Image: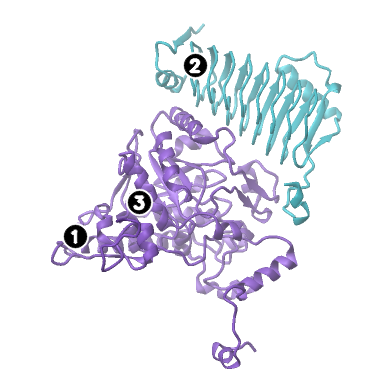
């Protein structure tokens, strides 16, 4: 069994920690303690390893993650798991703005709430939020799934492309070209799978509403000028 | 039959300077279609530009260098402030960011071939990096754009430098629009979008706003790439003095300032012609910011927007740039707007020398298109050779001027070598009006 390697950010510079996490042929488990709100913790990972961060992190934690399984035992600042490609990022607390922004793959779970622009420009990631999300979430979302167990703020899914959004609670308002859509069996199964993967298997999927693109703004036309 | 100029004079026909024929045509077009005009290229209006400056060649008070004998170096190092691997280019002329999507695959390949042949860099664009351009580019700058289309850490690590794009001179404050006819299956796949739909590029980055956030973002990019690569910040020229200062504070190794003559693949005509400031006005503002921060030449300045000749290169450098970038001129060197396509241009309602509908994907030269048949017209080997030739000419022209001014390196050119032929240019460039010692605005 491989040993767990520990990094204490009060004793080791972040540069050295990230550099160690970028080592070729990386394997095993890693624990980062005392992040104390540091930015760019465990960014640019590209190895199938487990990283646990004990504490709150600043901006861009786990940014551009590939393969790694990263758990944050605390809150995360702006852009957690931004542009993630694969692997998983699990935030035990709340997340600030732009969680999972432009991410292409992998899974992001936020057990608490996520602030504005959650899933903005998402390109294939699956995001499950235990609580609420702020305004402009899933703005220009291209692909992937965003599950919101609580409420969504204003302008949800504004200018959305092909991403799917599932919301259990209230939606303050929908953005341009975002509409409620029918939940077919496929969608119930998809949602059930996503919830289970995020540890929320108890939810009744029939209490969720699916949202997606009306596809009416896919081609610019003067008649739609008032929609923008 | 249309009237000649003489006919109109004889008949006493007077064209309105305010409502000239282009204006009348634009109003008719707007009335008929109900939509604004979208086109490529940069600002076409007449602006104070490098043509309004002249060099003071050496004579009695300065010592020239022998034209074909004495060395005049042209190399430039970009991004040596923080990066482990700065770029060391052979010439101070780089290729500006242009996307695969806006341009055909063979055109991107030709840009890489031409740039590599003369030891300079080329740049990706919105939509990500293609293997062809990485393979053919000795030095490739990877643009990090608001849309993040095709953005992935593998390509980030393959790049030689990273350019965080805040805007471009043709449309500072604007996003992008690639119309559906150019969203081929490959372009759609790279951008994670359905085929054939209009693709919008956001005007703001999705995960940061403002200069303080940019500092953190740049640090993240450095951490991901282990502090190996230079980080550029590109801005469209507007409040250039402040933007450059903020970019430097945010940690930029290189600042790219793109004037309003800089090109675009598709933007509203009203945006191109009415937002931003001329390149000539922006360069001294950028240099002032760098000098006040005591980082001039330590943080390098790349200037773009309307660079056409070695004289433009030399003048930009003399005003304080470390290098220039070319986009429109590079496309022309590849064959864009070439008279050999005159009949094709006419079928499109345009003419050689006027074609700017890059957004339509109908480019007869096979450059700004995703149509396989049109793209097949373009030979990337020939295009690469043409671009390399052109880059060599720009370099030799700049050397010619530098030697005449007594400089052993083109980067030794300085504002003291310049005068202006118009008051406007003198005021913008902050060099004396020719034949005087008067710089407008200075006592």
| Towards the viewer: B39 or A90 | B39
What percent of the width, then of the height, locates residue B278? 45, 58
Q: Chain of mark 2?
A: A
For chain A, the rendered hue is cyan
**Other-residue count near label 1 (Cα within 10 Å), few / some / many at <14 / 14–19 / ≥20:** many
Q: CA distance from mark 1 to mark 3?
A: 19 Å
The image shows residue B20, relative to residue A220, as above or below, that is below
- Which chain is assigned purple? B
**Horizontal placement of B62 versus B153: left or right?**
left
**Is any atom of residue B94 visible in this view?**
no
On-image quarter of the C terminus of chain B: bottom left
Of tags 2 and 1, the one toward the viewer is 1
Q: Chain of mark 1?
A: B
Identify the residue under disc 3.
B323
Q: Chain of mark 3?
A: B
| Towards the viewer: B179 or B321 | B321
Identify the residue under disc 1.
B406
**Horizontal placement of B87 versus A17: left or right?**
left
Displayed quadrant of residue A106? top right
Displayed quadrant of residue B377? bottom right
What percent of the width, then of the height, locates residue B38? 63, 60
**Other-residue count near label 3 (Cα within 10 Å), few / some / many at <14 / 14–19 / ≥20:** many
Identify the residue under disc 2.
A27
> Label 2's element?
loop
What percent of the width, then of the height, locates residue A67? 56, 24
Residue for point 76% across, 21% down: A150
Residue for point 28% across, 50% down: B75
What percent of the width, then of the height, locates residue A10? 42, 11
């Amino acid at each position: 069994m491989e040993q767990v390697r520990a990094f204490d950010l009060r004793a080791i510079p972040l540069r050295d920690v990230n550099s160690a996490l970028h080592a070729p042929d990386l394997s095993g488990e890693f624990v980062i303690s005392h992040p104390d709100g540091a930015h760019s913790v465990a960014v640019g990972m590209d190895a199938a390893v487990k990283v646990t961060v004990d504490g709150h992190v600043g901006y861009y934690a786990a940014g551009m993650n590939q393969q790694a399984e990263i758990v944050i035992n605390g809150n995360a600042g702006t852009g957690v798991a931004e542009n993630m490609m694969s692997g998983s990022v699990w935030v035990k607390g709340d997340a600030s703005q732009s969680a999972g922004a432009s991410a292409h793959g992998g899974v992001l779970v936020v057990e608490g709430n996520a602030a504005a622009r959650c899933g903005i420009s998402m390109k294939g990631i699956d995001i499950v939020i235990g609580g609420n999300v702020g305004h402009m979430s899933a703005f220009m979302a291209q692909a992937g799934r965003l599950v919101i167990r609580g409420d969504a703020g204003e302008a949800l899914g504004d200018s959305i492309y092909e991403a799917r959004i599932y919301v259990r609670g209230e939606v303050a308002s929908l953005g341009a070209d975002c509409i409620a859509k029918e939940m077919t069996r496929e969608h119930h199964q998809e949602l059930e799978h996503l919830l289970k993967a995020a540890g929320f298997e108890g939810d009744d999927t029939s209490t969720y509403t699916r949202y997606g693109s009306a596809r009416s703004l896919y081609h610019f036309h003067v008649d739609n000028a008032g929609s923008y | 039959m249309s009237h000649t100029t003489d006919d109109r004079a004889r008949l006493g026909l007077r064209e309105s300077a305010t409502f000239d024929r282009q204006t009348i045509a634009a109003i008719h077009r707007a009335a008929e279609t109900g939509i604004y005009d979208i086109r490529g290229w940069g600002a076409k209006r007449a602006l104070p530009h490098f043509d309004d400056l002249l060099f003071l060649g050496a004579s009695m008070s300065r010592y020239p260098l022998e034209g074909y004998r004495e060395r005049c170096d042209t190399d430039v190092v970009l991004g040596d402030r923080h990066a482990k691997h700065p770029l060391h280019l052979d010439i101070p002329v780089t290729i500006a960011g242009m996307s695969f999507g806006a341009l055909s695959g063979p055109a991107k390949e030709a840009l890489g071939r031409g740039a590599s042949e003369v030891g300079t860099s080329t740049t990706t664009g919105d939509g990500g990096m293609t293997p062809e351009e990485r393979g053919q580019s000795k030095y490739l700058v990877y643009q990090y754009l608001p849309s993040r289309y095709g953005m992935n850490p593998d390509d980030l690590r393959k790049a030689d430098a990273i350019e965080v794009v805040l805007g471009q001179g043709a449309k500072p404050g604007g996003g992008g629009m690639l119309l559906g006819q150019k969203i081929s299956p490959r372009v759609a796949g790279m951008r994670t979008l359905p085929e054939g739909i209009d693709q919008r590029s956001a005007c703001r980055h999705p995960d940061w706003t403002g200069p303080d956030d940019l500092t953190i973002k740049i640090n993240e990019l450095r951490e991901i790439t282990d502090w190996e690569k230079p980080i550029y910040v590109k801005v469209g020229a507007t409040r250039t003095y402040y933007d450059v200062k903020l970019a430097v504070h945010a940690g930029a190794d290189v600042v790219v300032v793109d004037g309003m003559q800089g090109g675009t693949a598709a933007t509203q005509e009203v945006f191109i012609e009415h937002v931003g400031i001329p390149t000539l006005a922006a360069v001294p503002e950028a240099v002032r910011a760098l000098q006040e921060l005591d980082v001039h030449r330590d943080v390098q300045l790349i200037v773009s927007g309307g660079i056409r000749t070695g004289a433009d290169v030399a003048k930009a450098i003399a005003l304080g740039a470390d290098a220039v970038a070319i986009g429109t001129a590079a496309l022309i060197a590849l064959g864009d707007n070439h008279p050999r396509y005159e009949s094709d241009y006419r079928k499109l309602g345009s003419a050689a020398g006027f074609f700017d509908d890059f957004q339509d994907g109908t480019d007869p030269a096979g450059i700004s298109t995703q149509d396989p048949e049109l793209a097949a017209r373009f030979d990337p080997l020939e295009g690469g050779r043409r671009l390399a030739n052109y880059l060599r000419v720009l370099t030799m022209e700049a050397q010619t001027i530098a030697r005449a001014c007594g400089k052993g390196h083109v980067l030794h050119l300085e504002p003291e070598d310049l005068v202006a032929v118009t008051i406007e240019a003198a005021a913008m460039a902050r060099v004396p009006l020719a034949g005087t010692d008067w710089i407008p605005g200075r006592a």
